[in-house]
Amino acid sequence: MTEQAATDGLARQLRAARRWAGITQEQLAGLSTVSVRAIRDLEQGRVRHPRRETLRLLADAMRLGDARRAALELAVEGAPADTVMREAFGAELAPPPEPLRRLVGRTEELRALTGLLATEHERLLTVVGIAGVGKTRLAQEAALLLHTRDRMPVLWVDMGTAAPAAGSARSPRAALTAWARSLADGGPGLDELASVVRDRAALLVLDGHDAASRPAPQLLELLHSCERLKVLITAREPHRTPGNRLLPLAPLPLPAPEPSSDAATPLPGASLSAGEPAVELMLSYVGHMRPDLLPTDSVVRTVARICHALDGVPRAMESAASWLLLHSLEELLRIARTSPLDLVDDATLSDVNEEGLGAVLAAAVGRMDTAQATLLGDLGALADGWTAEQAAAVLAVPAATVAREVHALMLRGLVRRLPAEAEGASRFGVLNLVRGLAADRAAAAARRSAALVH
């Protein structure tokens, strides 16, 4: 790379930034205290070694965001920004976040997700499910597999955290992330990101993209511009967009109901947690908090009952286990059965915006319209194991309406499918974690309706 090429790259970056800011050279000079002549020389490539302070003044005057500031930083160091950005997006330098824990009980979901990502025509996918169900962890595992197996660069954007302050992106990787975040929120960044990705196979992950009901049009334009790019979104509610493949993520499978007293007892030495991912995961949490609780048959059975009460939601189980510092295992089971939301908030597991799982679940129920919330409350009053036809008959609601609403509730993770007997009809149940919230919402709606009548 010649020195002249690097200078030309800086000139292009500066001209593009000024035009993006919508100001003339004279206006930029007045805002930055840098002379018009110096700006003209920079934009025409006559200055090969500009002072960093000069570029900082120009960037401040144009109010550049992180991405464009990083491009100028790279250019002043003698490297064309577009080349450095493309190199930063190579497979070796663009891995996904390294998982801190092993993935438990998601073999089939991982196979389905990676299988879709490996196909040519599935390019926009959304893993959707209730808060705390493990969407981020599944996306991490899928991204890591594609990165290591297929040498695919991954750009991971945590949409749930606040964007960095302006001027804080001092690396190509940070600039790429800033472009992607801006584009996902409907802002600029399309041209810059498209010029980096181009025709290479790559994966963009927008983790926790909950702010919008559908991806921004710019994101779809990026997919059209970069024909081998794939976008994976994790969200609490489905994104309604043509071509978007939804993958609902249910809580971990629960162990079968306890056998009756006359049923055959397990063989000596048989593991009560084998093949039960929810129980296995909960036992690991219990073991970390209370190493003195050995996994005897009695402990494992109590843990299995707690898993049922907490719906097999990983984050709820982890938070509940932390309360073993205060409660016995039997007390934990009693609270989980009567007031499960009292166990799901743990200061160490709260979101970055200080919202605990309970508040997030309450917000999910609160966003529902009155009719859907009322139906959820009514369904929650039924014993688990109802079919859509049975629910329609009991509630005196048209079967088509119940089927449509149950489908929508399952996509949002508020209703789960229960194991069916052989080839029988699908059976469902409302999550225990939202049952009380839905009942409260339905009762409040009924009171408002009665008040309007009177």
Image: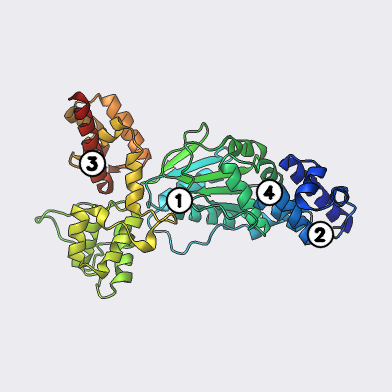
- In the image shown, does 56 or 220 lie closer to the viewer? 56
Mark 3 vs 2, N-terminal side: 2
The answer to whether 261 appears left or right of 244 in the picture is: left
Q: Nearer the viewer, mark 1 or mark 2?
A: 2
Could you tell me which quadrant the C terminus lies in?
top left
Q: Which residue is mark 2?
A: 78
Of labels 3 and 1, the one closer to you: 3
- Reply above or below: 260 against 15: below
Residue type at the position of mark 4: Arg
Q: Earlier in the sequence, mark 1 or mark 2?
A: 2
Alpha-carbon span between mark 3 and mark 1: 36 Å
Q: Is residue 34 above or below residue 365?
A: below
Kindly identify the amino acid type of the residue bearing the numbered disc 2: Gly
Residue located beneath label 4 in the image = 63
Of the 4 image quadrants, the one containing the N terminus is bottom right
Marks 2 and 4: CB-CB under 8 Å?
no
The residue that mark 3 highlights is 440
Q: Which mark is residue 269?
A: none
Report how far apart the C-alphas of labels 2 and 4 lie in the structure. Answer: 23 Å
